[in-house]
Image (cartoon, rainbow, N blue to C red):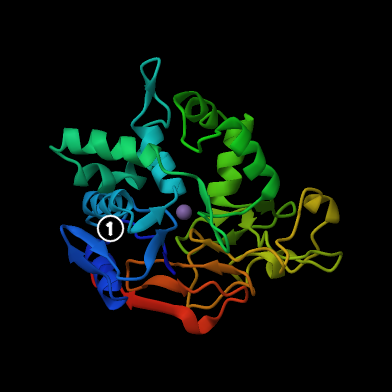
Amino acid sequence: MFDIIGDIHGYIVTLERLLQKMGYRKTGGVYRHPDRKAVFVGDFTDRGPGVRAVLKLVKKMVDAGTAYAVMGNHEFNFISYNTYYNGMPLREHSLKTSRQIKETEESFKGKTESKKKLLQWTQSLPLYLEFDNFRVIHACWDFEYIERLSELLPDQKLTSEFLIKANRVGTEEYRIIEILLKGKELILPRGASYTDKDGNNRRRIRYQWWRKVDAETTYRRIAVNYEPEIPNTLVPLAEFHRHVPYLHEHKPVFVGHYWQRGTPRVLSANVCCVDYGVGKCHLLVAYRFDGEQTLSNDKFIYVSCTE
Ligand SMILES: [Mn+2]
């Protein structure tokens, strides 16, 4: 069976502690478990001190068949920042983007060959995984966009052409990456805003794409993370014209990305987020999945970050 592991963001020591706590042992330079496999939900890079080591560890496990991994939005940005087209990087090198990727770039200082190899491997990661009885994606399982993606990229690997288009606002490729790797958002009514965990003033909320919505749905109640400043006013139903809830009869789906707080708990009977914001005293979390259709809060395992 499978251990689905949340966003790591360069915290290598914490990752090794979680793997050991779950019974994985390093043999022949690779972590493995006698009868389980790990599944990583992406976001290996940025923030922590050991980005290169995390990428190496995960790649070794995937290459040896002891783990699976999907791409997160931070890997997408890492690739785009380091890919040039007509002499320009696909993701601009502004103060903001350079600050976001600082720890990742630093971990590769003087390691040009290693960076090239790991960038190539990162670009080969699938955007989603579908198993017999569960699914994995970094942020949002949307049937329509996943079908469209599988038409555009039949073998699931990001091509240069797709990557170029996906960095251009307004293209279908851009939209696919936004939805699958960053989730769905709603723009707040005119004049409304709130302050997020990093102190940024925001006019958009990430919303619970898996939920059923109706005429009573408010911005505050449908937001993924509760913030008292989000207005409790009704969301016009027209905002949900493309909304398809993730019904309970669908296979369980595991995501990262959403930086949950408190004691780990499932988002619904068949939707589970394993991102608890590792770093700054938060948790690195895994869900130990044994094929159940109804997920349980008892199956989380975690370590707190000490790096
Ligand atoms: Mn993310």
Residue at 41% of width from left, 71% of height from top? 286
Is 169 left, or right, of 305 in this rendering? Answer: right
Q: Quadrant of residue 39?
A: bottom left
Q: Position of residue 15 (x, y in %)?
A: 28, 66
The C terminus lies in quadrant: bottom left
Q: Residue furthest left?
A: 110
Q: Farthest residue toward the bottom?
A: 298
Please, what is the three-letter code of the amino acid marked with disc 1?
Gly
Residue 252 in percent (x, y) is at 60, 66
Residue behind mark 1? 48
Residue shown at 37% from the left, 34% from the top = 81
Name of the residue lying farthest toward the right = 215
The answer to whether 298 is drawn above or below residue 306 in the figure is below
Q: Is the residue indicated by label 1 positioned so its CB lies within 8 Å of ligand 1?
A: no
Along the viewing direction, whichever of 198 and 122 lies nearer the viewer = 122
Q: Nearer the viewer, residue 5 or 111?
A: 5
- Crowding near the residue tagged with mark 1, few <14, some 14–19, many ≥20 C-alpha atoms within 10 Å: many
Q: Is residue 241 above or below residue 154?
A: below
Label 1: element kind: loop
Can the viewer see residue 41 in this picture? yes
Which residue shows up at 25% across the image and 73% down it? 20
